[in-house]
Image (cartoon, helix red, strand yellow):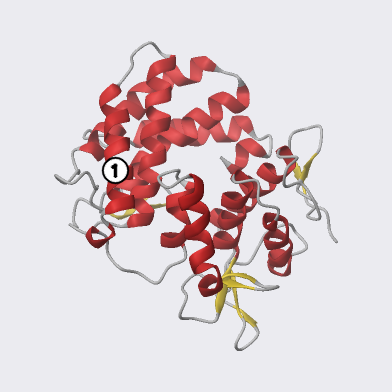
Amino acid sequence: MGLDVAGCHAEAAAAYRWLARTQNPDGSWYAEYRDGQVTDSAKDTNFTAYIAVGVLHHALSTQNSSFLRELWPTVRDAIEFVLRMRSPEGAIQWRDSSSLFLISGCSSIHQALLCAAAIASRLGSPRPDWIRAASELATTIRCRPDLFEVKPHSMDWYYPVLGSAITGSAALRRLSDDWDWFVVPGLGVRCVFDQPWVTGGETAELALTLALLGDSRANALLADIEMLRRSDGSYWTGYQFANQVIWPEERTTWTAGAILLASAALRDNPAVHGAFKPLSLVSQGKPRYPIE
C-alpha cells in the first residue's frame, strides 16, 4: 500500500502476485518469509485477511478493476480461512496455533472483511455473510473487551478506531481517554505504555487514524518522527528517550509503509493538511523525500 501511494504501482502489483503464487491451499500464508523461504510456519489470521485491503487499495489507486478479478480467488480463499477461525462470540483467534484473541488483529480483520465484501460486490458476487461477520466482530470489539488478551501496546488503543470497529463519539472518547498514556509530546507514540520508547510505525498509524477523523494533530505527530529519518529517506524503527538513543538499529518496511500512508492521508485531506510537508512524488512515480 505504501508503494501504491508513492506511485510505484508495478512494484505493488508484483507483491500481490507473489502472494497469490505462494498462498497455501487452505487460503492462508505463513507468518514469516525471508528470501522466499518460510521462517515461521504459524498462520496469522490478520496477515492473511489484510490482502483484501491491499488489493482493493491497489485497484482504486490504479483505477484497474481487472486486477480485482485477477486476485479475487486469492482474496476469497484468504477470507474463508480467516472465518474458519471465528469463535462463537464472533472474535477471530490470532493464529492457527493459538487460541488468543488480539484486539489489534481483530480490528484489522474487521476492516479487511469490509474491503473483501466491497470487492465481492464490485465483481457481482455479493457476500452478505462477510458483512454480517464484520458487524458481529465490531460488536465483540466494542462490547466484550474481556475476550481479548490484555497487552500494553498502543496498537490496542487506536486500532479499533483505525479499523472502523469503533466510530463516532465513542472513537473520539477512546482516543482521548488514553492519549496521555501513549503520546509523548514532541517525540511521538510509545510502542508500549510502560517503556520510554517511541516508534515511527505506531506514530504514523496514529497520525493516519487522526487524519481519517479530520484531527489536525496528525501533522504534529508526523513532524515529531522526522528525528528518525535518515538522509537517504529511510526511517529508524524507534527512539529510546530515557537514554536518548536510536533503538533498535534497524529500518523496517512497515515503518516506511505507515509513514507513506499517513503522509498521503494528510496530503489528500484538506481538513488536516497543515504544518507537516507530506512526501511529494516526482513525475516518474518515485518518492522524493524533502530534507528539512
User: Residue 232 in the image: x percent, y percent?
Assistant: 75, 59
Determine the residue positioned at 70% across, 45% down.
266
User: Which quarter of the figure is the C terminus placed in?
Assistant: bottom right
Determine the residue positioned at 20% across, 50% down.
96
123 left or right of 57 in image: left
Q: Mark 1 points at which residue?
A: 137
Query: Residue placed farthest to the left in the image?
Result: 88
Question: Does residue 229 show up?
Answer: no
Determine the residue positioned at 61% across, 40% down.
3
Question: Does residue 255 show up?
Answer: yes
Could you say which is closer to the camera, residue 144 or residue 255?
144
Could you say which is closer to the camera, residue 15 or residue 65?
65
User: Which quarter of the figure is the N terminus placed in?
Assistant: top right
Q: Is residue 57 shown above or below 101? A: above
Q: Check disc 1 and report its element: helix, strand or loop.
A: helix
Quadrant for residue 52, please give it.
Answer: top left
Query: Residue placed farthest to the front in the image?
Result: 169
User: Residue 18 in the image: x percent, y percent?
Assistant: 43, 35
Q: Which amino acid does label 1 sit on?
A: Leu
Q: How crowded is mark 1: few (under 14 residues within 10 Å), some or many (20 or more)?
A: many
User: Residue 258 in the image: x percent, y percent?
Assistant: 58, 52
Could you say which is closer to the camera, residue 140 or residue 73?
140
Determine the residue positioned at 46% across, 73% down.
192
Q: Is residue 215 shown above or below 153? A: above
Query: Residue placed farthest to the right in the image?
Result: 292
User: Residue 73 in the image: x percent, y percent?
Assistant: 33, 23
39 left or right of 164 in image: left
- How many marks are shown on the rendered structure? 1
Query: Residue placed farthest to the top in the image?
Result: 124
